[in-house]
Each structure stands twice: as structure tokens, then as C-alpha cells.
Image: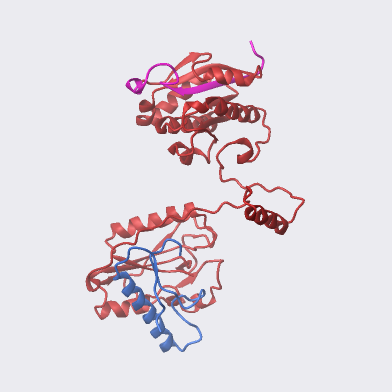
Amino acid sequence: MVGSSRIIPGSGIVHPVGNADLDPEAEKALRRAIVEKALEALQTELQEQKVFSPPK
Amino acid sequence: MSLGLKIVHYVNQLFGGIGGEEKANVGPQVKDGVVGPGKATQDALKGRGEVVATVICGDNYFAEKTKEASEEVLRLLTPYKPDVVIAGPAFNAGRYGVACGEVCKVVQEKLGIPAVTGMYEENPGVDLYKKDVYVVRTSDSAIGMTQAISSMVRIALKLAAKEKIGKPAEEGYFPRGIIKTETSPKTATERAVDMLLAKLKGQSFESELTLPKFERIKPAPAIRNLSSAKIALVTDGGLVPKGNPDKLESRRATKFGSYSIKGLDTLSSKEYEAHHVGYDITFTNQDPNRMLPLDVMRDLEREGVIGKVHETFYTLAGVATPLADCKRLGQGIAEQLKAEGVAGVILTST
């Protein structure tokens, strides 16, 4: 993601916003947490590239 | 009369002896034989060829009417039946550099005649034309004329004789982005260690791989009012409607896809799949929301957290794509997103 200004570490190469090991409900909750983090990043004023910490 | 090669030389109004900036508007004209730097060219040829004509055009005329100017230049030089065309050198003169590059390019494309030019590394003509034509590296002013002409003539002679042109550093031209296979008595490991040792000793070495230069991108301003913002989904995970209707490449993308998700609450594995050779697509194909999080975006839209999910998503397979293509495709997607009033993008990447 060279050149991206706001980066959220995803949940793996094969499913950046998912996790096949989780049950469907937990997986969707994880996806929502990552997306919410991305929305937080979009609302963050930045001067240079930032890698945000992944959701817990 | 020389029995050697016939060369036509292209120069601007200044080197053509017509005048300075006040004459930059003059259109193309041709003179028999040598004019200006053509004398140095003639000397460097050492009897192996002859400058049979010189085409002269004002820099502003060429810059303002590029298409007409290049057509006129072609028309003027064609009757001389040159074996090779030499343009410039333009040194650090920007308009002149672009004119030289364009003349060489159209001569090669339209007449099938090889051509060579020369410029200083910061001349904008270098980046514009180095892939299409041999652009010899010159100094920034006419002080380097003899050296520049010498390199240009050497390449011109080889081009005309269809001889192999050596590497950019050996022949003195700007790299054209061409990779050629060659054999080496040393393994890659040995060559790499040789380079490392040379580097440690402060000696010069030439890398076999030129890394692309990545630009620093200034972050876009933050979104102030998320609850009224239109957010788009973009992915380089190669997600497409089942069957890949637009035949997007699964590697080295040359185009991107845009697909409507209007009215969809989620992405079904019956309707979407990934085409991408860079990761195991099994999990995306089981549940495409793992690649493009439409289901949770719809929840957030319903809850009023975001204003709207943009009704089109953009996609391509981001794998083994040259930087220049990435830039072109990214700009293409960004232009559409801007035109469609999108405030923010979530781009999921594998």
C-alpha cells in the first residue's frame, strides 16, 4: 500500500476484512471493527502517512 | 559525394541560425546540407555518412502546433530519403527537447527510419520520449556539443547498420525501460556479493535492478461530517461479478472494473468471485464480504454512522502491475470517484 496515507492492518492477506476461523457472527464483528477503524482514520487530520493500530 | 549514410538533421531556430526567441514562431523549413551543429555531426561522421539536409523549426511553433509541425517536418525530410535522423541536441531547452523527441518518434513510427536525439537529464523531453527513442545524455548547455554529437553519431551509425546498441551506461543514453536477457559467468549470488563489496569499499557499481521511485503523497483532508459523507469501496483483490464479464486481468492489470452494488445488502458468493493470481482466493469466494465489506457498510449506513455507501465499487487485481500502470489506473479510479461526489474511500488490499 505504498502511497496510502491512512493504513489499517487487515486480518490477513487472504481475507483483509474477515477471518475464516471465526464463526459468522464473530467474523462480522471483526469486519465491523476494522471498518470502524478505517472510518476513524478518514476523520483524522494527517500531515504524513500513518499506520493505525489494528482493532483489538 | 559520400557513398555512406544519408542523415537529416533537425534543429530549432536558434541552432538553425534564424534567430533567438523573437523567431521562435517560425514554421518548419528545410535547407540542403549542413546548418549549425550539423557541422559537428558531419565531422564526427568521418566520411561514413553525410548530412544531406537540415530541417529547422521554431520552438514555439512546434510546441503550440505539435501535430501540424511534426507532419510538416516529415513532409520536408521525406524526399531526402535519410537512413537515419538526428535531432538536436537540445541540452536543457525544454520546448526544443520535446520537439526533438517528437520528431524522432514520428520519424520512427511513420517512416520506419531510426532516429536519435540528445538532452540534459532535467529536460522534460527526456521523461516524455526516452522510452520511444534513444535520448543521449548531454550537458545542460552547448558547451557539451562535441561530446553530445559524438554519442549521437555513434548510436546513429549503429542504428542505421542495425547493429546491437549496448547498455545505457556504455552508450551514454537514458535507460528506456527495456530488460534484456544475457548470460553471465557468475551466479546472481556472486554478482550481488561483488556489488556489496564494491559498495563497502566506496567503489562504483551498477545495480541490475532499478527500483521505481515512489512519490510522497500528501494525505487528503479529514472528513468532517461522516454522517452525511458518501463512502466508496475499492479493492485490489480482484473481486468481480461471477464469470468476470469484463475480462479483468488476474495479474498485471491494464484496466479496472466498476460495478453497481445499488440495492445490495451483502455480496453473495453466488454472484461475486475473485480473479487474482497473487493470493489464495478460496476465502473471498466463500464470502466476498471478506474482501469488500459491503454487509457492515450497509449496517453503518442504516445506523446513520455514514451518509451513504457509494453505489459503484471499483476493482482490479493488484499484482505484478508496473508502477506507471498503477498510477494511471489509480488516477482513473480517483477521477471517477471525485466526479461522483465521493468523500472518502475504503480500499481493501490483499
Q: Nearer the viewer, residue A21 or B93?
A: B93
Left or right: B308 in relation to B8: left
The residue segment tinted magenta is B1-25
Q: Residue furthest right?
A: B185
* Colour assignment, chain B: red
Picture mark count: 0
Q: Position of residue B296 (x, y in %)?
A: 35, 79
Q: Position of residue B327 (x, y in %)?
A: 44, 54
Residue at (72% x, 57% y) in the render: B190
Residue B265 at least partly seen? no
Residue B191 at least partly seen? yes
Residue at (49% x, 63% y) in the render: B317
Residue at (39% x, 81% y) in the render: A55
Quadrant in which the N terminus of chain B is drawn:
top right
Is B233 located above or below residue B123 in the figure?
Answer: below
Chain shown blue: that is A
Q: Position of residue B155 (x, y in %)?
A: 61, 31
